[in-house]
Image: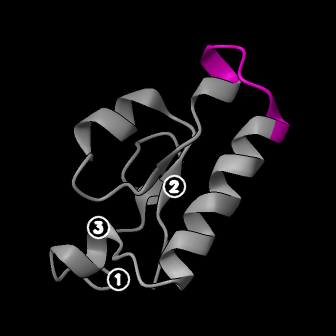
């Protein structure tokens, strides 16, 4: 499985059907990096324990989009 994550709140909202983990709070809401890391670790453990990722749920696989190439400035 592939866990897709973003640190961009706008991407998390507009691509909610593709993003499994939103860590934008570290950049915008004062969330600590340690807290985000703990949440990500829990997500990884859940996924390794059988929880389906968005790509698996929607049958998208791991190659439908490279998010970093969607933006004009990258």
Q: Position of residue 39 (x, y in %)?
A: 65, 48
Place residue 33 in its image quadrant: top right
Which portion, as a residue range, is magenta? Answer: 27-34
Q: Are marks 1 and 3 in contact (CB under 8 Å)?
A: no
Viewer-proximal residue among 55 and 51: 51
Q: Position of residue 6 (x, y in %)?
A: 52, 47
Q: Are marks 2 and 3 in contact (CB under 8 Å)?
A: no
Place residue 43 in its image quadrant: bottom right
Name the residue at 61% across, 16% down.
28
Q: Is residue 23 left or right of residue 9?
A: right
Question: SS for tag 2?
Answer: strand
In the rendering, which numbered label is found on residue 54? 3
Q: Nearer the viewer, mark 1 or mark 3?
A: 3
Give the CA distance from mark 2 to mark 1: 14 Å
N-term mark: 1 or 3: 3
Q: Which residue is mark 1?
A: 63
Give the CA distance from mark 2 to mark 3: 11 Å
In the rendering, which numbered label is found on residue 5? 2
Q: Is residue 15 above or below residue 46?
A: above
Q: Residues within 10 Å of mark 2 (few under 14, many from 20)?
A: some
Q: Position of residue 13 (x, y in %)?
A: 29, 34
Q: Residues within 10 Å of mark 3 (few under 14, many from 20)?
A: some
Q: Is residue 35 left or right of residue 60?
A: right
Indicate whether residue 28 is drawn in magenta: yes
Please tell me how many numbered marks the rendered image carries.
3
Viewer-proximal residue among 54 and 68: 54
N-term mark: 2 or 1: 2
Name the residue at 41% across, 44% down.
71
């Amino acid at each position: 499985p592939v866990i897709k994550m973003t640190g961009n709140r706008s991407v998390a909202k507009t691509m909610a059907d593709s993003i499994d983990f939103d860590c934008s709070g570290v950049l915008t809401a004062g969330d600590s990096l340690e807290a985000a890391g703990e949440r990500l670790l829990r997500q990884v453990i859940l996924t390794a324990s059988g929880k389906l990722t968005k790509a698996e749920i929607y049958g998208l696989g791991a190659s439908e989009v490279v998010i970093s190439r969607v933006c004009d400035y990258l």
